[in-house]
Amino acid sequence: MQGAPLTLRRETTGAELRAPADWRDPPAGDAPGQEATTDTTPPEARSNPTRGPAILRYASVPADLPEADLHLARALAPDALDCTLIFGANGSDAGHILSPGGAFRDSRAIGCHAGGEIDDSGYATGRLVGLGLPRSHFRARALAFSEAEAQATTTLVRRILKARGVLQQEAPDWSEDFAVLLVEGARLPAETVAARIASALGPIPMIGASLAPSAAPSSAHADTARVIFGSGNVACGAMLLMVRGRCPVRAFRSDHFAPTDRRMVVTAADPAFRLVTGINGAPAAQEYARLTGLDPARMGPADFIAHPLLVRVGEEHFIRAIRRVTPQGALEFRSAVGEGMVLTLARAGDMAECLDRDLEALRQDSPTGAAPDMILAFDSHLRRSEATARGQADRLSAIMARHRLRGLSSQGEQQGGRYLNHSLTGLAIYPPPAESPL
């Protein structure tokens, strides 16, 4: 997709407060309203292409573009940013850009490799996507957790409370807080980590993504084997970004399923391995196949996507996605299961209509009267696969582009302490009331 020549607006309005001591204080930006053009950036590098200059910075470049990190840095102008989120295609050199020789080496940033990106075209592949939080509107702290730290509740709580206190001191007049969690699901129990962190955060809204390494990194850079990375070239099992700012936020989730009246009870399970071996007193795979009308000898990923199961929590239903059938006839799930759990067969609605409805509600119910400036989104790779199979990927992409979604495709999603499958979780970031358009 070709774009127009790149023109950026650098925002420097608002109070300038001192950055945390563990991150280098970037130099001041240009004067308010000054335009800066990036003539050397190729047309493929897109930045804030719709609805005029945004508060959040955004850019997307091909991951295989020579010196892609330099083009991304030119487009984002990180000198005026308090933090940058970077999502890179699996097998790309995304992690390298925060290394001592990378373009963002002097910037505070976190990022990850993704199995698919979301940019201004909607669903995308092979991109390097950057989202910048300007210092005029945000202050951030990034906490990198090793595998051991992520599973130690006392350590999590202590570090989160300390970071929260620092942010309150730096921006005492700002009251909008949110958090973003990235977890390497192959190394850590994402459900447990998300629940512990959400408990420590209290009322602060949090969304998150569980990520998996590329099966076959294509680059010579060792960074391609790392899923999550941060400033100082830090590798970790989980990364929490805590943000305080001027912009109202709203966390949400979206899916397109409704419960039917067909229910089943898990009668035998191995929760440690997310295995269900018995349903309604019968072998799990056989009973699932009977209830869905599938051939138990031929069931595969496409069948599980088309016939998902729901679990009820309070008044809401959440998807419990099946990963595979084991050789022993058990069902391996993508999230927590246990004996006695009641599962409900789901009925799928129109993906595009449901997503557009949920995103339109964010605009109609805006806390400021304005549409979101941008929406950070973690969209399940299962949704992307289903959209492609149903021929709806283009429709969903158009809706995402219109509502300014930016993010990635995830292996699992988090909203607060809940771990989700086959869903989209997002954080709508609104302009402050004084900056909302009439």
Image: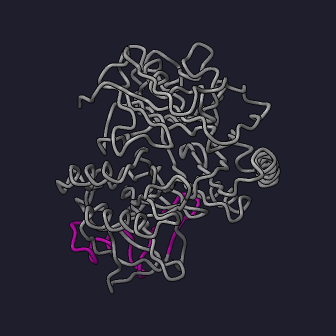
- Which one is nearer the viewer's eye here, 98 or 236? 98
In the rendered structure, the answer to whether residue 320 lies left or right of residue 144 reads left
Res 145 seen here: no
In the figure, residue 149 lies in which quadrant?
top right
In the rendered structure, the answer to whether residue 154 lies left or right of residue 83 reads right
- The colour mode here is one colour
User: In this rendering, is residue 239 above or below 66?
Assistant: below
Res 255 seen here: yes
Numbered disc total: 0
- Which one is nearer the viewer's eye here, 289 or 119? 119
At 34% from the left edge and 76% from the top edge, which residue is drawn? 258
Question: How far from the left and from the top, in percent, is residue 50?
Answer: 33, 43
At 45% from the left edge and 15% from the top edge, which residue is drawn? 220
Residue extending furthest toward the left? 391
In the figure, residue 107 lies in which quadrant?
top right
In the rendered structure, the answer to whether residue 117 lies left or right of residue 146 reads left
Residue extending furthest toward the bottom? 261
User: In this rendering, is residue 67 above or below 75?
Assistant: above
Question: How far from the left and from the top, in percent, is residue 311?
Answer: 46, 75
Instruction: Specify the segment rendered in magenta.
Output: 268-296
Question: How far from the left and from the top, in percent, is residue 356?
Answer: 31, 63
In the figure, residue 66 lies in which quadrant?
top left
Task: Examine the structure image and report whether residue 270 is included in the region drawn in magenta.
Answer: yes
In the rendered structure, the answer to whether residue 78 lies left or right of residue 373 reads right
Task: Examine the structure image and report whether residue 357 is included in the region drawn in magenta.
Answer: no
